[in-house]
């Protein structure tokens, strides 16, 4: 669970706030905090920089953690895991997992 600076997902440098949590970053954007930069950190990790001279982001991140929005973000993450289970992370069917369909026809082939 997202808990702020202790997990290293949020850091401030003057009016710039750096986040690596996609869900919290989307919430800040939704709440009107201006994004000034996005960059790739590793293969599956990105950093988002927000311009926040008023110092609102820390409280907004905590609001996000304590809101129903966190539950929604968790549900989206679970759906992504289902997709990755059947297709892998590169949108191609994963080895030995068929074409991603959950149902099989009577002849043993996967159907959409």
Image: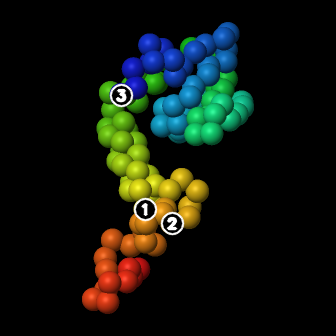
CB under 8 Å between discs 1 and 2: yes
If the image is split into quadrants, where does the N terminus sit?
top left
Residue 1 — which label? Answer: 3
Q: Which mark is nearer the camera, 1 or 3?
A: 1
- Dividing the picture into quadrants, the one containing residue 2 is top left
Task: Name the mark on residue 18.
Answer: none
Label 3 crowd bin: few (<14), some (14–19), many (20+), radius 10 Å: few
Q: CA distance from mark 3 to mark 2?
A: 30 Å
Label 1 residue SS = helix
| Identity of the residue drawn at 36% across and 36% down | 70
- For the point 56% across and 64% down, the residue is 92
Query: Which residue is label 1 attached to?
Result: 86
**Decide: marks 1, 3 in contact (CB < 8 A)?**
no
Cα distance in 3D space between marks 1 and 3: 25 Å
Location of residue 55 with respect to 103 vertically, above or below:
above
Tell me if residue 32 can be seen. Answer: no
Looking at this rendering, what residue extends furthest in the top direction?
Answer: 14
Of 70 and 93, the residue lying toward us: 93
Image x and y of residue 97, in percent = 41, 66
Please say if the residues under marks 3 and 2 sit with CB atoms less than 8 Å apart: no
Using the image, determine if residue 10 lies above or below residue 84: above
Q: Position of residue 98 (x, y in %)?
A: 43, 71
Q: Which residue is mark 2?
A: 93
Instruction: Tell me the quarter of the picture where residue 104 sits.
Output: bottom left
In the image, residue 55 sits, relative to residue 92, either above or below, namely above
Label 3 or label 2, whichever lies nearer to me, is 2
Please provide percent x and percent y for residue 25: 54, 33
**Cα separation between marks 1 and 2:** 6 Å
Dot 1: within a 10 Å radius of its alpha carbon, few (fewer than 14), some, or many (20 or more) residues? many
Q: Residues within 10 Å of mark 2 (few under 14, many from 20)?
A: some
- What kind of element bears circle 2? loop
Residue at left 33%, top 71%?
Answer: 102
């Amino acid at each position: 669970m997202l808990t702020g600076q202790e997990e290293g997902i949020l850091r401030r440098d003057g009016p710039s706030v750096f986040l690596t949590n996609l869900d919290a970053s989307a919430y800040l954007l939704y709440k009107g905090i201006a994004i000034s930069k996005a960059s790739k950190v590793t293969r599956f990790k990105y950093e988002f920089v927000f311009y926040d001279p008023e110092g609102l982001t820390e409280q907004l991140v905590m609001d996000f953690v304590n809101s129903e929005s966190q539950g929604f973000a968790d549900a989206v993450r679970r759906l992504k895991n289902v997709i990755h289970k059947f297709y892998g992370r590169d949108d191609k069917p994963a080895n030995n997992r068929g074409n991603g369909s959950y149902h099989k026809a009577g002849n043993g082939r996967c159907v959409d």
